[in-house]
Image (cartoon, rainbow, N blue to C red):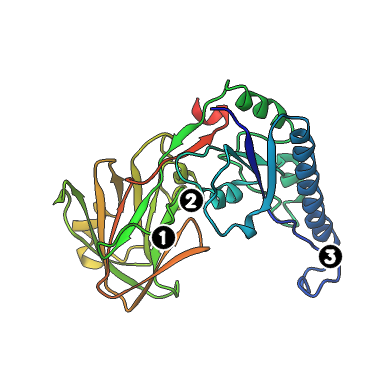
Amino acid sequence: MAIRRLLLLLKPFDVYAVGSKSLPRITNSQVLHYLDNRRKVHKDAVNFCQNILRQKSVDWETILRTDLSQPIRDFDLVVTVGGDGTLLRASHFIDDSIPVVGVNSDPTQAEEVAHLSCEFDATRSTGHLCAATVKNFEQVLDDILAGCKNPCNLTRMSVSINSQPPVSTYALNDMLIAHPCPSTVSRFSFKLEKDSESCSPLANCRSSGLRISTAAGSTAAMHSAGGFVMPILSEDLQYMVREPILGGAGNGISNLMHGIIKQDESMEARWFCDEGVVYIDGSHVRHFIQYGDTLQFSSKAPILKVFLPNHILS
């Protein structure tokens, strides 16, 4: 497909001014210098990408990710500059027809993390899904424009509530179902289904919630919680009950607390608390639920076309 129009989607430019009222507790000048340097590095990366685009035979526009409010249409490619969070934000406004490529504007430097470890955590965005940095952006872009590089199809996840059509935002990473107050015990049940028939026992749970991830999201919160990393192109989902309270009946259901939802299966969950929230790809997209609501999760969602880094495919 010929790339004629391109959207450059940017992470906002953070400002960390010394003495700012928004940062009254930060007194360590090394920390302030570090934060301000992050802004400068990101700004330099944005300027670099824009200068490269000016040399190419392609029309392009720039928008901050915070200004996105409508579906992205009439573009042939979306380039995100920031980290995985910026690519995630883009995915919520893209269907399965427009590919996206991520530029990690400020990759973590291992030496810097080690040097500053006694002061603070200097890690930045992992850039797991970002195919480029400023070091190779022009080459990656040239390969895409020349048709020498093809996007991969990443599985996304849908959720429908009370048999209604799926909510409009599809998850690229994961969904978390929990009480609005994280210290409140959540009560819910779930089972797996195939062809509208149950294919697993019903699990009745008390816990801090339920997380379901895609393959792309299995390296994030799911992995941190003890889950396993899935092949990036897998069409399955992975689920885990967070901090289950098993009690005396735990032996019978403990093996149901973590598992796989195959591509031809779905999960039906029922909520038994007065309040609940479905968090999609973090905390920015939320859908509120209430007692008795039924939720259906599956990988039957539009794929996302992403140009991935080579190492993630090997």
Task: Tell me what residue is drawn at x 31 percent, y 76 percent.
Answer: 273
Tell me: 142 left or right of 75: right
- The answer to whether 133 is drawn above or below residue 157 in the figure is above
| Towards the viewer: 129 or 158 | 158
For the residue carrying disc 1, how many other residues have a C-alpha within 10 Å: few (<14), some (14-19), or many (20+)? many
Distance, label 2 to label 1, CA atoms, is 14 Å
Query: Residue type at mark 1?
Result: Leu
Distance, label 2 to label 3, CA atoms, is 33 Å
The mark nearer the N terminus, 2 or 1, is 1
* Residue 13, horizontal then vertical, whole percent: 75, 56
SS class of the residue under badge 3? loop
Image mark for residue 224: 2
For the residue carrying disc 3, how many other residues have a C-alpha within 10 Å: few (<14), some (14-19), or many (20+)? few
For the residue carrying disc 2, how many other residues have a C-alpha within 10 Å: few (<14), some (14-19), or many (20+)? few
Task: Tell me what residue is drawn at x 81 percent, y 44 percent.
Answer: 44
Image mark for residue 176: 1
**In the rendered image, which residue does mark 3 sit on?**
17
Query: Residue type at mark 2?
Result: Ser
Tell me: 128 left or right of 34: left
Task: Tell me what residue is drawn at x 61 percent, y 42 percent.
Answer: 127
Residue furthest left as drawn: 197
SS class of the residue under badge 2? helix
- The answer to whether 59 is drawn above or below residue 174 in the figure is above
